[in-house]
Amino acid sequence: MFGQMMDQPLLISSQISFAERFHADVEVVTRTVEGPIHRSTWGEVARRSRRLANALLKMGVREGDRVATIAWNTQRHLELYFAVSGLGAILHTINPRLSPEQLAYVVDHAADEWVFFDTTFVKLAEILAARPKSTVRGFVAMTDEAHRPASSIEGLLVHDTLLEAESDALVWPTFDERTASSLCYTSGTSGHPKGVVYSHRSTVLHSYAVTMTDTLALSAADVTLPVVPMFHVNAWGVPYACAMVGSKLVLPGPGLDGKSLTELVEAEGVTSLLGVPTVWANLLAHLASEGKKLGTVKKVVIGGSACPGTMIEAFEKGHNARVIHAWGMTETSPVGTVNVMLPEHEGMPWSEVLSYKLKQGRPMYGVDLRIVDDEGTELPRDGKASGHLQIRGPWVASGYFRQEGSDTHHDGWFATGDIATLDARGTMQITDRSKDVIKSGGEWISSIDLENAALACPGVQTAAAFGLPHPKWQERPMLVVVRAPGTELTANEVMSFLAGRMPRWWLPDAIEFVEALPIGPTGKVLKRTLRERFAGYVFST
């Protein structure tokens, strides 16, 4: 016997339709690629999305077709989020930080038919357009006629001109909620990038999840500024969730530096920030140099890589902004766990609070976690055993685009590539990436713990730890440090600071200083590049 509830599919078009019906006057603000601040509303975004959908239909876009974007966080990109998926086509958001070879690979692998691009990325679009063999039928510059770029691309179309020729009269089609909605490729730090295909169902369920009070708590009371890019994992699902709850949305465009972000926060009264640690390090440095505070910001969601304790303390003690440490991957839509304090943590001293906040948190309803050993045997949830983290849930990928299967999937579980601990309450802490964990003398050394300890040292701006081959111990840790501006920090000073803060055998065998760390397309440190740079390094005895 079935229940007698209405059977309505969970579709992305229903989110923007809901926004237009129930909070049409809530603002959507963009720092445009052209420069000025653009002000709109959810109602206007809904109308323009329908006009864009009509234009896409005239361009021959049909259900299942891939439409690519190479773009910043802007209103035009937001319109594409709803117009493409709303028609049953697939929005392929491309990371512009990919190499030209990887860029061409993902366009070909996805079989994209149209490419929309911000004028910042004209050169990338021209590289794609110049290739003799491609599925791409045409290119659209995401601007207006006044800012049409000079380009060698034949038949180049302009985003706003397409919309001006269309009506906003459109009834969004209805189809199976399991229909593919969007496509995002992993960063491809090893081998070719892999495509992850999200469905309407997974996207809407993920939107519900990140609005819950015990997760990211996105709500109508928020003024939300996602610095996490819309070209990576759908900006952590923020655009969809904000449309659903009616949050004012502030989009930073290409202005991701500390000064530009501070101006937006102050001008728009931003209450909620979301982004990766590298972005927040720059913001905090700018605020410190200007002697400013984040007056309106109430919460800062930090993910993408482990957040150091010094950053948590800077936001919470220095700016009175609550840090929400979260974890996820392209393959998990991306939010899998969120660190929100529990009732039993009330009254804890700050040192214990900070220790807890360094963890990646507990899974949201719908997500299940486990850790296993090298043989696949599940390990105890005691907060001590460390093993390979696996995850499953309705917004977790079951495979990769155009691949039958994957060695990352085991008995219905996805192997994340992370090494982690789990406690009895499900609190998870990443201790390392499986490829980054340092294996010394048969024991594991956490590169993340070593980095966090180094970041607390005065004079250290940023640091990375990784293992290098050792004739006796298999691997030993090396620490690479970027000095804070104006400091003359020495390796002995760093080593003295670390001594006593961790087991003696965890201490790095070498400390080297560099001008900057290599950063990948998603803002993470490229440790493979560091290993290659220091290959053959001989530790002193």
Image (spheres, rainbow, N blue to C red):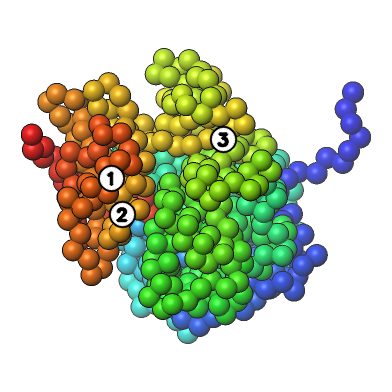
Mark 2: secondary structure = loop
Residue drawn at the location 88% of the way across and 27% of the way down? 2
Residue drawn at the location 59% of the way across and 52% of the way down? 237
Q: Nearer the viewer, residue 339 or 203?
A: 339
Mark 1 neighbour density, 10 Å: few (under 14) some (14–19) many (20 or more): many
Q: Is residue 246 visible?
A: no
Estimate the x, y position of residue 150 in percent, counting from the top left.
36, 78
Vertical arrangement, residue 528 with respect to residue 393, above or below: below
Mark 3: secondary structure = loop
Left or right of 227, for residue 496: left
Do labels 2 and 3 touch, CB within 8 Å? no
Residue located beneath label 2 in the image: 457
Q: Nearer the viewer, residue 354 or 119?
A: 354
Vertical arrangement, residue 516 with respect to residue 149, above or below: above
Residue located beneath label 3 in the image: 427
Quarter holding the C terminus is top left
The CA distance from mark 2 to mark 3 is 27 Å
Mark 1: secondary structure = helix
Mark with earlier residue (2, 1)? 2
Do labels 2 and 1 touch, CB within 8 Å? yes
Residue drawn at the location 43% of the way across and 19% of the way down? 373
Amino acid carrying label 3: it is Thr
Q: Nearer the viewer, residue 332 or 403?
A: 332
Disc number placed over residue 319 in the picture, else none: none
Amino acid carrying label 2: it is Cys
Residue drawn at the location 53% of the way across and 24% of the way down? 382
Of the two numbered discs 3 and 1 in the rendering, the one whose residue sits closer to the viewer: 1
Estimate the x, y position of residue 216 in percent, counting from the top left.
63, 52
Amino acid carrying label 1: it is Leu
Disc number placed over residue 498 in the picture, else none: 1
Of the two numbered discs 2 and 3 in the rendering, the one whose residue sits closer to the viewer: 2
